[in-house]
Amino acid sequence: MELSTADSVDEALDELSRRGERCRVLAGGTDVMIQLARREIAPEHLLHVERLGELRAVETDGSTRLGALVTHRDLAVGRLGPGYAAVAESAATVGGLQTQVVGTIGGNVCNASPAADTLPALLVHDAEVTLRSVRGSRTVPLAEFVVGRRVTTRAPDELLTTITLGRPAPRTGDVYLKVGRRSAMEVAIVGLAARLTFDGTGVVTDARIAVASVGPRPLRSVGAETALVGGTGDAESVHAAAKALLQDVDPIDDVRGTADYRRRVIPGLLGRAVRVCAQRAEG
Amino acid sequence: MSVIGERVPRSDGRAKASGEAEYGVDHAEPDMIWGALVRSPVSSGRITRLDTAPALAMPGVHAVVTAADAPDTRAGWVLRDQRLFAADRVLYEGQPVAAVAADTLELAREAAAAVVLEIEPLPAVVDLDAALRPDAPLVHPDWESYVPALGPDADYPRHGNLAAESVSDPPGVDDAFARAHRVVTDEFVVQRQYQAYIEPKSAVGIYRDGRFTVHTAHQFPYNVRDRVSQFLDVRPSAVRIVGHTIGGGFGAKLDAALEPYAALLSKAARGRAVKLVNTRTEDLITCPSREGAITRVRSALDEDGTIIARELEVIADNGAYSGEMPWLASIALHCARGVYRAGPTRVTARLVYTNTAPTGAFRGVNGTYLYHAVERHMDHIAAELGVDRREYRLRHLFDDGEELLNGQVLTDAGILREGFEAIEAAAPWAKLEAERRPYRGIGIAAAWWLTNPMPGTAVVKLHEDGTAAVITAATDNGSGAVSMGVTQIVAERLGIPPSDVFVTLPDTDVAGFDAGSQGSRTTRIVGKASQIAADEVITKLKDVAAGLLEAAADDLEVADGTVRVKGAPGTSVPIAVVAATATNTVGPIQGTGSFVTPFPDFNPGCATGLMLPSFPTPTYHVHLAEVEVDPVTGTVQVLRYLVAQEVGAVISPDGTYGQVMGGVTQGIGYALHESLRIGEDGRYRERTLESYRLPLAGDVPRVEFFPLEHPDPDGPHGAKGVGEGPILLPAAVIANAVSDAIGRPLNNIPITPEEVLAALQTAELRNDEEHVR
Ligand SMILES: Cc1cc2nc3c(=O)[nH]c(=O)nc-3n(C[C@H](O)[C@H](O)[C@H](O)COP(=O)(O)OP(=O)(O)OC[C@H]3O[C@@H](n4cnc5c(N)ncnc54)[C@H](O)[C@@H]3O)c2cc1C
């Protein structure tokens, strides 16, 4: 196995175009190194992209754009500014400090784990991902990019460069809640992100709900969102939303938790998320 | 100035913090090669093919050994039921079938993978109740031919899958149940617990001049020596065990693991040093973890609610081989009533062979789940009677002079009441009850425990510069028992600073027998032996100094780095001068000490299979926890944890608190986080530290600790054992607190968020239904 380090995006794109499937992008390496050790992957070439400074940028004027190499730690300390609490909270739960200072948002997205913490948070913020190759550039909604368990629509020659988030409207609150058996260093048993916008009278006008670890890939539940809109976050609308959400998920039993537990936890978690969003929307 | 009870830097602290300390896993020898084990991938089966030729043919492979290359013998700590390699049948997943030695670790592992091993699977015995049924397949069809390590006369009750049994059936139990006003019954199920030390097991074996030397980081080097000698069929003195700094053990490094394989491989590789090291998964799945168990308790109550009789049955998982376990089975007798009077008590302890990794010692052996059962049961009884749980305990609490089921008399059990009072002063029970918030709960429990009595010895040698070396096979498994405790005790006696006392690492060729770092014994036993040795040094110092000071030896004292005339400190001579003078006149100064605590008197007829007959040097423990349950996730946060513990005397405040904090942390993990499940196929489900979840700093509150000091006349400065007690009760108090918080009994360990949430939601559903009606 060879290792090379790209000094510019163009150089990286050239490498990717030449080597295609035989090449594996290496960002923070917190997934790649483990997959190598477990012999789950056996690339001929590792292309180290961590030095591409331009992919570390965060722009918050106008739309919110962040480079693929922005680290979890950057996000956890609030580099995206107010309005993106869910993103900060989700990044703050990725492993421990050691993982967060090297692990990148782009890596979390491209690895496309069913339990990826930042994905629900990005989904509730209508994230779009921009991929570049020597052939050009394309921008697609995150929900269309991550299509299955560890499966994305990334072509072998593409590099994820930017993630673009929607701008939260006024009177919006968002949150990420993670269920684990201990207080940190957990792969999510369930992860849930919510973003709710309220009108002046406390009625929900816009809702986003997304979950992780309850199916092959993190996903939004439009059913749950619809059930919440028009309500006030009251028990009845939450109940209806939970019912819809449970219909959209397909949890399994695994070593971390049972499908039954995951189903049991979702309604309460959703209720808690709605309450936090309402509080944050006021503040 | 006394250094006893003072905070002193641990002698190994700097080296450990800086990375200079050489742990067993760091050890290397010149020309060393590497080994790897071929392990059974299934838990039960018959070996149909074992072909080592492909591995032997690989360049760089020095040796491949199997059962055919090892002595045809069985070994074991208590019972010789184990072969070095599986010969025809495999009895647990991870059991060694062959071993290879090669130039590099990677190559050794590749060669191990190249060994062809075919196994025809057989049904696995996993379920404890099923294992005892008459029609259950036998894990050891040849069980009858096995011989105890101490010879046939040391045999004990065992039969088929029943690896050991201890039964106590005093008169009056059935009568009491017949006239009982009320009977309360419970069943408790606990999982295994992995010791999860940071340093995986390793060993470097060297065969030279007809002797085996093994380097290892071990809690009990002399036990390794004996096991290697049994497995390799050589006399014990043909084996030398050299100890190294230990990265944690907690009981899992008390019996041999990789050492005999490293020794045999070195012989097969014509004397090249061979190093074996476990991967984390190998370590986890083959570790002698704390046994899973089922405990069934029944108590008979009279009309006042007083307990008048009890029955306790415990069925514990021995795994495929016995190790130390049969010796521990009778602990059930000592803990069956906890620390509360309960009338005549019938106790049945059964240890069961299964097709799973052998279980073994883990800090607080057997006690964690016995106290969990007894203390949960006490809460259940109090709830049935509608009385206060703490009050009910105090009503039955042991007092001074309590006679136990084995006839042992606890002269000082009244200390327990002091423990309850110490906790009460810091966390008044009535106040906690009054301030109860939803989803919060409290639990209280108490225990007694032993200080392991087994022998230890030390030589204290005075250098000509006035410093002292302590030569002992005792090990500091991280607790500070040697690096602070023994060091302080010798420094105190010789009147020199702790930094002038050096304690050797164990080497069985050099230091006398020591029973290892187990059962909270090292500070007390080795401390006492060292103190005796130091006293011999003092006598010799005074004799030589008497000549130098022209005074009678009896008029001298050793203090402040000098030998001086009592009452005239000005008339003194530095210890260094005395030591140097001695070397050239009467010869070098050293002293020897040995110590063992006798077993307290007991009634040998009280039970069958009474292998650990009584609890020497008892200590007393009271714990209280406050928890909060998250009603959405079912997870539990421990908000407050209090410990009142009888310690004899605090030698090292940091060491003592460290043990309390660490033991409670491990107990919280046992109660809430650490899941070690065995599937129906006999294989562990959790196989790495990703899924085997240890508690983190954020999961554990800072323990509020109240040491109770009642110096023991036989202990050095009054010291008793400290290290194990703190892990005995967290499962009990947390289970009681969580059950209190949600108003429903939780009787399994660990307490899972799944179980808590299901219990909460069932309760809510029931409340809703009642509401509708
Ligand atoms: C101890 C530990 C704990 C962890 N805990 C969590 C957790 O709690 N929650 C969680 O979600 N994850 C967790 N992870 C996983 C991991 O940290 C995250 O997925 C992280 O975001 C990956 O980022 P990275 O930069 O390290 O990716 P890498 O390992 O470098 O790459 C991951 C994948 O993405 C690809 N890739 C990376 N960047 C790009 C790019 N710009 N363009 C195209 N492809 C790219 C790589 O080829 C690879 O397939 C944990 C990992 C460890 C080691």
Image (cartoon, rainbow, N blue to C red):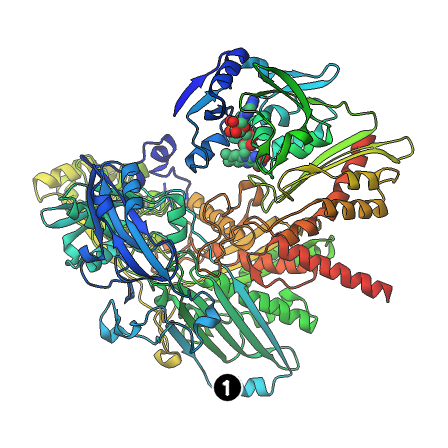
Asked if A265 appears above or below B397 in the picture, the reply is above
Q: Residue furthest right?
A: A201
Measuring 28% from the left and 48% from the top, which residue is drawn there?
A: B115
Q: Quadrant of residue B235?
A: bottom left
Can residue B266 be spotted in the picture?
Answer: yes
Measuring 34% from the left and 71% from the top, which residue is drawn there?
A: B611
Residue beneath label 1, please? B172
**Image mark count:** 1
Which percent across, then down, holds residue B353? 39, 67
Q: Is residue B635 left or right of residue B89?
A: right
Asked if B92 appears above or below B301 in the picture, the reply is above
Instruction: Give the SS element for disc 1.
Output: loop
Q: Is mark 1 within 8 Å of ligand 1?
A: no
Q: Quadrant of residue B145?
A: bottom left
State which chain disc 1 sits on. Answer: B
Q: Nearer the viewer, residue B208 or B346?
A: B208
Q: Is residue B453 left or right of residue B620?
A: left
Measuring 63% from the left and 51% from the top, which residue is drawn there?
A: A259
Asked if A32 appears above or below B442 in the picture, the reply is above
Which percent across, then down, holds residue A202? 88, 35
Local crowd at mark 1 within 10 Å, few (<14), some, or many (≥20)? some
Measuring 66% from the left and 58% from the top, which residue is drawn there?
A: B429
Q: Quadrant of residue B168?
A: bottom left
- Image-quarter location of ligand 1: top right
Looking at the rendered structure, the kind of residue marked 1 is Gly
Which percent across, then down, holds residue B586? 8, 44
Q: Nearer the viewer, residue B448 or B50?
A: B50
Which percent across, then down, holds residue B625? 60, 54
Q: In which quadrant will I find the N terminus of chain B? A: top left
Q: Nearer the viewer, residue B469 or A58?
A: A58
Q: Residue furthest left?
A: B585
